[in-house]
Amino acid sequence: MILALDTPPIDWFALAPTLALLTAGALNLILAVLWPKSWKRPTTAVVCALGFAGAIVAAALLFSHSADGHGVIADVIQRDRLGALTAIIIAGAGILAIGTSYSEPMADDHIAEYYALLAWAGAGMVFLASASTLLTLFLGLEWFSISLYILCAIDRDLAGSLEAGLKYLIIGGFGSAMLLFGSALVYGATGRLEFGEIANVVQAQDLSGDALLVAGLALLIGGLGFKASAAPFHMWTPDVYEGAPTPVTAFMSAATKTVALVVTLRILVTAFPQEARLWTVTIAVIACASLAVGNLAALVQKGVKRMLAYSSISHAGFMLIAVASDNALGGRALLYYLIPYSAMSVGAFAVVATRERELNRPVTLDNLAGFGWERPLLGISMMTFMLGFAGFPLTGGFVGKFYVFAAAYEHGWIWLVIVGLAATAVSLYYYLGVIRAMYMRPTEELQLAPVGGSPPRELVLQSTVTAALVVTVGSFFAVQPLIHVAKEAAASLPF
Amino acid sequence: MSSGWLTTALILFPVAGALLLWVLPLRPFAVGSTALLFALVEVGLWIDSVAQFDFSQPGLQLDQRTSWFSDLHVSYHVGFYGFSIWLVGLTTVVLAAAIGYAFWAGRERPRAYYGLMLLLTGAIVGVFVAQDLLLFYVFWEAMLVPLYVLVGVWGGAGRLRATLVFVIYTMAGSLLMLASIIVLGLSQGTFDLVTSGTNGSDWIFLGFVAAFAVKAPLFPLHAWLPEAYRESSPEVAAVLSGVVSKAAAYGFLRIAIAKFPGPVSDFRTPILVLAACGLVYGSLLAFRAPDVRGVIAYSSLAQMGLITLGLFAVNDLGLNGAVLQMVNHGLISATLFLLAGGIERRTATGELALLGGMARGRPALATVLLTAGVIALAVPGSAAFAGEFAILAGVFQTGWGYAVVGAVAIVLAAMYILRLISAVLHDRVGSAVPEAALDLRPAELGVVVPLVAILLALSAWPAAITERSFVGSAANVVGRAAK
C-alpha cells in the first residue's frame, strides 16, 4: 500500500539562497573525490564563492519580490525581507571568509571538505534566518552548528583546533538542548509550533504569564544566547575563537552572530508579543551583562584573537540593546549594525590571519609592533576596523551605535543608553591598544623575526580586507539607502 | 556653482590632499611641499569665503544642506556665521604654519604625517561650520583620531601615556555629549542646529558642557593638558592649544549658550567660578612651570578660563571680546609653541634653568619672541589687550568680582611671560645653550612672522573681528540663533 502524503506546494524561489549554497557544498564534495589534487584548492574555493554569490543574488531578488511577508511550504518558512536581508549579510560574510581562507596553510587533502562545510554552514544559517516554526528553528540551528563544529576542528595541524571543536560541540550541544527543551515547553503550553500561531493562542486563551510558557521563553532565549555568544552564555567564545582556524573564527563571529540575533528578534517579536514586558527587560539585562563581561575581559587580553572574541561578546551586547528596545527603530538599528559589524569582524580576523601566517605563531599585541608601517594597506584597514568597533565616525560602527542608542531612547530607556556609552568608553582602551601596538611602537621592539623573506603578496586576502574596508567606511556615507533596506526588512515583523 | 560649495570645499580640499599624499608614492621633499601647498590653498579658499561673506547680513551664509539619513532627520548642513568664519581662518592659518614648520623641521614617515595634518585641518574646519548636531559630533570625533596618532607616533618619550590620558579624558566628555545629542535631537525631532529650538534640560546641557570643558580644557578637567602639550611635537602642540581648544570654546558659544538659555542662567555662577579659578590657577602654574612648554601650556589653561568668562557673561562685550580673544590666543600660543620648538631644536631641552642668554647674537629670535610675548601679556594697544579688556568689561556687568579676578590674572600673565622671556633670552647664558646655536632661520621666520604680523594687524584694528562677528547685538544674535 502506498502511503498517501499530502505534499505542500513548495516555493522554490523562497528556498533559492539555501539551495545555491547546498548545491555549492555538494559540488565541492564531488570535486573532493574527482578533482586533481593540485587544482582542488582554487576550484573548490571558487565553487564555494559562487555558491555564496548565488545566494546573494537570489536573496536580493527575493528581497525585491517579497514586499508582503508570508509563510510558504506549509508555513514552516517565512518568505520575507527580513530573511532575505539576513541571507545577504550572511552570504557576504561567507565570501569574505573564503577570501580569508584562501591562503590559509591547510592540508590539501581536506580542503574541498572545508569549503563544502563552509557552504553548508551558510546554507543552514540562511535557512534559519527564515524559519517560522519551532521545528525549523531547531533544524536550522543544528544544521549550521554541526557544520561549524567540524569546521572548528578541521585543521588537525593547528594546536587547539581540535580542542576548540570539541568545546564548541559540548557547549553548543548544551545550548541546543536548552533551545529544544524551551521549544517543548512552549509547545506544551500552547500546542502550536508556528511563531505567529503561538502568539495567537496566547492571546486567545489568555496564557500570558503562564509558567510553562515563560519557562519555555527563558530557555529559548538562553539557547539563542549561546549562539549569539551573549553573556552569561558566552564562556565558550574566547576559547573557540582562539583555537579555531582564523578564517572559521571570522565567519563565525560575523555570520553566526547575525543569524542568532535576527532569529532572536524574530521569535521574540512574532511569537511572544504578549510577554514583551518580560523579555525586553531580560534582553536588556543580558545586553548589560554582555557589555560588562566583554569589555572588562577584553581589557586584559594579550592575544588579539582572544581580545576580538571578547569584543564580539560586547558587540552582541550592543546589538541586544536594539532587540530589547522592541520597536521598529530597534529592528532597523540591529539590521543596519550587522552590516558594518560583519565587515569589520571578518576584516579584523583576516588581518590577524595574515599576521599569523607571517610569524607562524599566534598574534599578540606585542608581536604587532611595527605591523602598521610594514603593511600599510592592512595596517590602515585594521586601524579602521578598530575605530569602527569603538564607534568612531567615518565608519558604519558609529552610525550603528547611534541607531542602537536612539532605539533604546525611543523605548524610554535612557539608562541603557548610558550603559552603552560607558561600555564604549571602556572599549576604547583595548581597541586603541591595537592601534598603539601597530603604529606607536618601533619595529625594533618586535622580538621575533618573521618566518623569512618578504611577506607574501596574498592578493586575495588583500582584496578581501579592502572589500571589508569599503563596506565599513561606505556604510557611514551610504546610511540612507542601507537604513531604507533595513527599514523594509524590519517592517516584516509585527512591531 | 552655489556658494555653499565653498564651505564644503574648505572641508574636503584638505581631506583630498591627505588621500592624495597617501596614494601617490612621492619623495619626502615633494610630500612636504605638496602638503604645504594644500594648506596655503586652503588659506586662499578661506580668504575667498571672507570675500563672499556679507558681514552686514545676519544668519547663516555660504550654507549647504543635503539629507544624510531622513528617518531621524539628520543632514549634512554646513555654513558660516560671522564668528565662525574667523575661527575657520584661525584654523587654516595655524595649520598652514604648523605644516610649514614640520616641513622645515623634517618628520619621519612624511606621507602619513602630512596626510594626518591635512585630515586634521578638514576635521577642525568641519567642527566650525557644521550646522547639524550629529555632523558636529562626527567632525568633533574625526578631529581626535589624527590627533591621537600624531601625538602617539611622532611625540616624545612619554607619548604613549600622554595619548592614553588625552583620549580617555576627551572621549569621556564626548560620549556624554553624544548622549545629550541623541536625547536632544530625538526629542526635538531634528538634529539641525539652525531650525531647532532651545531646550531647558539641565542634564542635556551638562552633557555638552562636559565635552567642551574637557577639550578646552576648563579647570579642574585639565589633567591631560600638560603631558599632551609637552609630549607632542611643537607644531602639534601649537594646533592643540591654538585651534583645538577653540573648538571647545566655539561649542560653548554655538550650542551650550545658544541652545540652553535656561540652564545657562542656572549654571552660570558655577561655570564662571570654575573659569575664574582656572584663570588664576593656570597663571600661577605657568609662573612656576620649569620649562618653556609648561609655561605656554598652563597659560593656555588660564586663557581658556578667560575666554569662558567672556562667553558666559552672555552680553555684547563679553561675547565680542571672547571671539577676538579666541583668535588672539590661537595665534599667540601657536607662535609661542613653534618658537619653543625652535629653542628645543637648538638646545635639546626646554628646561628654563638650562636656558638663558639667547638674545645675544640672535636678534631675530629675540625680536619675535619678545613681540609675541608682549602681545600675550596684553600690553595696552595689543590685540590681546582689546580682547581681554572687552571680556573683563563684559563680565564686570555680571559680577564685579570676576572682573577683579581677571585683572589680577592679567598681572600674573605679565609675570609668567616676562619670566619666560628673561629666562630664555636674557639672564646668564644657559648651560644647554651652545655657542653655535643659530638665530631663527629664514624658513622659521617665514612660518612665525606671518602669525605675529596678523597679531600686529589685529592690534591695530581689533574691530575687524569684534564688529564682524555678530550682526547687531551679540547677545541678541546668540538669542536669535537659539530661536
Image (cartoon, rainbow, N blue to C red):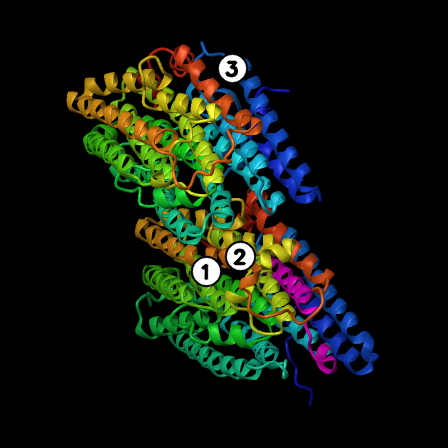
Residue at image position (16%, 22%) is B399
B202 is higher (above) or lower (below) than A261: above
The prevailing secondary structure element of the residues shown in magenta is helix
Give the foreground label among 1 and 3: 3
Give the foreground label among 3 and 2: 3
Residue A98 magenta: yes
Q: What's the amino acid at mark 3?
A: Phe
Residue A129 magenta: no
The location of residue A214, given as percent across then percent down, is 34, 71
Asked where in the image residue A252 lies, by quadrant, the reply is bottom right
Distance between the alpha carbons at the discs numbered 2 and 1:
8 Å
Residue at image position (48%, 36%) is B435
Subunit of mark 2? Answer: A
Q: Tell me the crowding category of disc 3: few under 14, some 14 to 19, or many 20 or more residues within 10 angstroms, Cα based.
A: some
Q: What's the amino acid at mark 2?
A: Tyr
Distance between the alpha carbons at the discs numbered 3 and 2:
43 Å
**Residue stretch in magenta:** A84-111
| Mark number, residue A341 | 2
